[in-house]
Amino acid sequence: MVIISTFLGDQKYFNRAWCPLMYKHQECQFYITAGPKFVYPKDLKNLHVNAINNNENDGPVLKCPIDSIPTYRGMIELQSKPKDWIGDPDDLDHEYFYKLEEIL
């Protein structure tokens, strides 16, 4: 599984919302595009900052806005998709996502 996103906004929101998801779901690869001052845990082996996913066998791929955090059920739904699936939150169903402002 792969999640691709672009970091925008307040750094603390990324740390509070996305980092726990990344630690919990080590089976998923997270590709985040971010600016030069982006701070992130260096021990997260499944977090790739400003890198390109060249391994097409890692799918399914979710292109997710940074302010939409997948729920546990959303991660299960993503995992059940075929390896060649590429989609966004609209393709999974918005009920499987938290909005960043809802959880902070």
Image: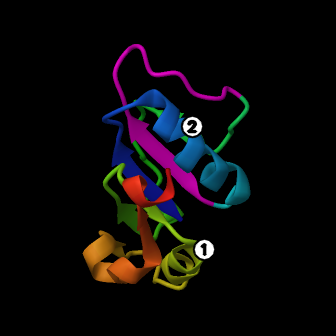
- Residue 13 lies, with reference to residue 5, above or below; the image says above
Left or right: where 21 falls relative to 67? right
Q: Position of residue 101 (x, y in %)?
A: 38, 53
Residue at image location 70% in from the left, 49% down from the top: 23
Q: Answer with left or right where residue 79 lies relative to residue 97.
A: right
Q: Residue at x 26, y 77 (%)?
A: 90
Q: First in sequence: mark 2 or mark 1?
A: 2
Q: On the image, numbered disc 1 is attached to which residue? A: 72
- Principal secondary structure, stretch drawn in magenta: loop
Q: Secondary structure at mark 1?
A: helix
Q: Magenta segment range?
A: 28-42
* Residue 64 rendering spot, x and y as whole percentages: 34, 58
Q: Position of residue 62 (x, y in %)?
A: 38, 65
The foreground one among 44 and 38 is: 38
How busy is the neighbourhood of tag 2: few (under 14 within 10 Å), some, or many (20 plus)?
some
Residue tagged 2: 15
Mark 2: which secondary structure? helix
- Other residues around mark 1 within 10 Å, as few (<14) / some (14–19) / many (≥20): some
Q: Is residue 16 above or below residue 95?
A: above
Q: CA distance from mark 2 to mark 1?
A: 18 Å
Magenta-span inclusion, residue 101 = no
Q: Is residue 39 magenta?
A: yes
Is 75 drawn above or below residue 34 in the view shown?
A: below
- Identified by mark 1, the residue type is Tyr
Q: Mark 2 belongs to which amino acid?
A: Asn
Q: Are marks 2 and 1 in contact (CB under 8 Å)?
A: no
Within the image, what quadrant is residue 37 found in? top left
Residue 28 lies left or right of residue 66; in this view the side is right
Confirm whether residue 68 shows in the render.
no
